[in-house]
């Protein structure tokens, strides 16, 4: 398979992981809702942090797909690695989640964010290595 095709596939996968973090955290694997008194639990703020990082990752992923300079594309893809790791560390490590482990934030949001964050980190690093000239 040609290098350009591999780079394109990896770029699309990076965009997919980034979109899953930014859009998915709000629509599919969102955290717990507000408490009865209307206040938000800490998991809500973890969700908001992942939303912001996912949005930044989505913009960078789009740039990876459409920037013409190969070195810049590799650098942008490599920048997604620490962002993906940072997103994966947010739930329950950087921002504590609910106290009960059977809550939605522990059972749905945390695993999904870890999976998509680490997948984006690995894909970004692989993209940078694949795109590197011999």
Image (cartoon, helix red, strand yellow):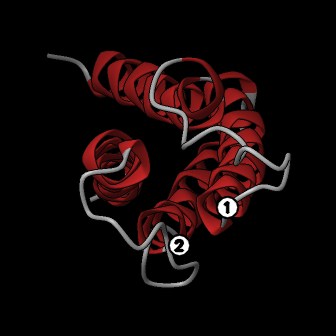
Q: Residue at x 35, y 30 (%)?
A: 10
Q: Is residue 84 left or right of residue 129?
A: right
- Circle nearer the N terminus (2, 1): 1
Residue 45 in picture, x, y percent from top left: 73, 61
**Compared to 104, does 23 lie above or below?**
above
**Compared to 18, does 57 lie above or below?**
below
Could you say whether the residue bearing mark 2 is in a helix, strand or loop? helix
Q: Depth check: 10 or 20 in front?
A: 20
Q: Residue at x 45, y 19 (%)?
A: 12
Question: Which residue appears farthest toward the left when viewing the image?
Answer: 1
On the rendered image, what quadrant is the N terminus found in?
A: top left
Q: Are marks 2 and 1 in contact (CB under 8 Å)?
A: no
Q: Is residue 106 left or right of residue 90?
A: left
Q: Depth check: 107 or 93 in front?
A: 107
Residue position for label 1:
41
Residue 119 in picture, x, y percent from top left: 29, 47
Tell me, for residue 33, which label it has, or none.
Answer: none
Q: Residue at x 55, y 57 (%)?
A: 80
Residue position for label 2:
86
Q: Residue at x 26, y 59 (%)?
A: 134
């Amino acid at each position: 398979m040609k290098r350009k095709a591999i780079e394109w596939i990896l770029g699309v996968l990076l965009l997919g992981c980034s979109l899953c973090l930014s859009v998915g955290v709000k629509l599919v694997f969102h955290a717990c809702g507000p408490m009865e008194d209307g206040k938000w639990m800490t998991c809500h703020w973890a969700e908001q942090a992942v939303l912001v990082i996912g949005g930044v990752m989505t913009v960078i992923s789009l740039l990876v797909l459409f920037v013409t300079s190969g070195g810049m594309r590799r650098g942008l893809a490599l920048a997604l690695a620490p962002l993906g790791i940072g997103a994966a560390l947010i739930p329950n490590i950087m921002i504590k989640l609910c106290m009960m482990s059977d809550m939605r934030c522990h059972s749905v949001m945390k695993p999904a964010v870890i999976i998509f964050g680490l997948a984006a980190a690995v894909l970004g690093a692989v993209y940078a290595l694949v795109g590197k000239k011999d």
